[in-house]
Amino acid sequence: MDPLVSIVIPVYNGSNYMREAIDSALHQTYSNIEIIVVNDGSNDNGKTKEIALSYGNKIRYFEKKNGGVSTALNLAIKKMHGKYFSWLSHDDIYYPDKVQVEIDALRAAGDMYRVVYSNWSSLVMPEGKITEYDGTTIYRQEFLETGAFTPIFGFISGCSLLIPKIYFDVYGGFDEKYRAVQDYKKWFEMFRGKRMVYVRKSLILSRQHSEQTTWKYSKRREEEYWLYNWMVNNVESDDIVGSGLTDMYHFYSAIFTRWILNPLWPGVAAINFLFNKLKELPESHDINERIKKFVELFQNLINQKDKVYFLKEEEQAFDLMFRLRGINLNCPQKFVSMEQLQELASKEKVNLVHFNSLMQWLIDTPIKKDMLEKLVKIN
């Protein structure tokens, strides 16, 4: 028998998009669902309530005083009857097979108590541009199914998740004192030390627009800085089991590799913490072997194809990452601007290698300790 899945839609002043969200939940190919809409104290002259009530008994509707998305989600968790929790933001859309694909993925994994999530697509408003985010273009499958990895590296769309209700019974609901990072805080608490199921398919369409509450929240950056520092300070060796990383030095090196190119994302304090950890810990025992493997992979990439190019805008990133590992490549790299690349492509077949496409290899290759202090200056 198919287990009941609760699709939870928290909403605040959602008359702009919520009908599309509810419709996408109702049109799931998986039939054993309940839809819970929680009105978090909307002040739009009853427009949100009116839309919700127009669905009658097709949904379960609750309303409360405004308290933030955490409070709305927690109310829904208390009210849900389902064995699984599936979050749908009022301005996002589920593709029709979202729930069915994830239930099937759990069955294929042979463990219905694991958490499953997927790729997602972003719809930028008002331009209407859609971009799919595929984790395997940057990370290996092992990384994507390591519970602590996905929150720390920022690769989870909360609405792509399907979570057994028992996780909330054990770990509690969302922390209501946070309004911007309550989701990732909970993901780290619940998923660390566990194996997840990753579906390499986009199952949701997530809108990005100027009216989103989280982006307008004045303390968003402050909360994000706190979150990333809290996560990296709480990583333990058990959290990397199954990731393919060999030890804690390798793990901190992988996080540092991903963050150093954009220190504003986690904040300078988190980068400094990683920097100091890498200075304190002994190097990975297999560091030279992994660096050698990286060089061989990169050289093969260059040599196996004709006309391989790299973007000029990414040259500094390549240079930093190679030098952090003490690598001096003995093969030429051709860096060109996007305009030059388009001109070349109009005349002959060319192969473009983006920096992100090498990220799997880079994360899997620890940084050399003696190069770290020489090349990285943090204020």
Image (cartoon, rainbow, N blue to C red):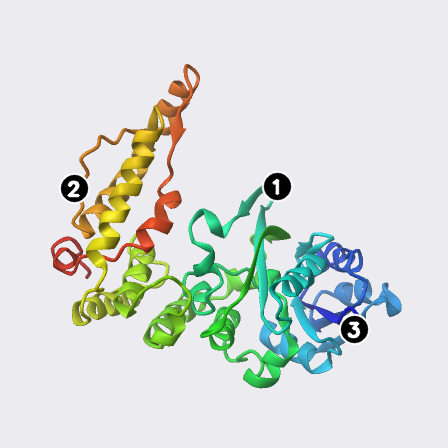
**x then y, percent, for residue 265:** 37, 59
> Which residue corresponds to the image point at 61% horizontal and 78% vertical from the top-left?
71
> Dot 2, crowdedness within 10 Å: few (<14), some or many (≥20)?
few
- Across and down, in percent, residue 174 comes to 56, 78
Q: Position of residue 291 (x, y in %)?
A: 23, 51
- Label pair 3/2, CB-CB below 8 angstroms: no
Circle 2 residue = 328
The Cα atoms of the two marked residues, 3 and 2, are separated by: 62 Å
Residue designated by label 3: 61
One can see residue 341 in this view = yes
Q: Secondary structure at mark 3?
A: strand
Pointer 1 residue:
128
Residue drawn where x is 45% and y is 60% of the image: 142
Instruction: Tell me which numbered mark, 3 or 1, is placed earlier along the sequence.
Output: 3
Q: Position of residue 74 (x, y in %)?
A: 63, 79
Q: Amino acid at mark 2?
A: Asn
Callout 1 secondary element: loop
Depth check, front residue: 12 or 187: 187
At a point 75% along the width and 71% down the height, the residue shown is 3
Mark 2 or mark 1: which comes first in sequence? 1
Foreground tag (2 vs 1): 2
Query: Tag 3: residue type?
Result: Tyr
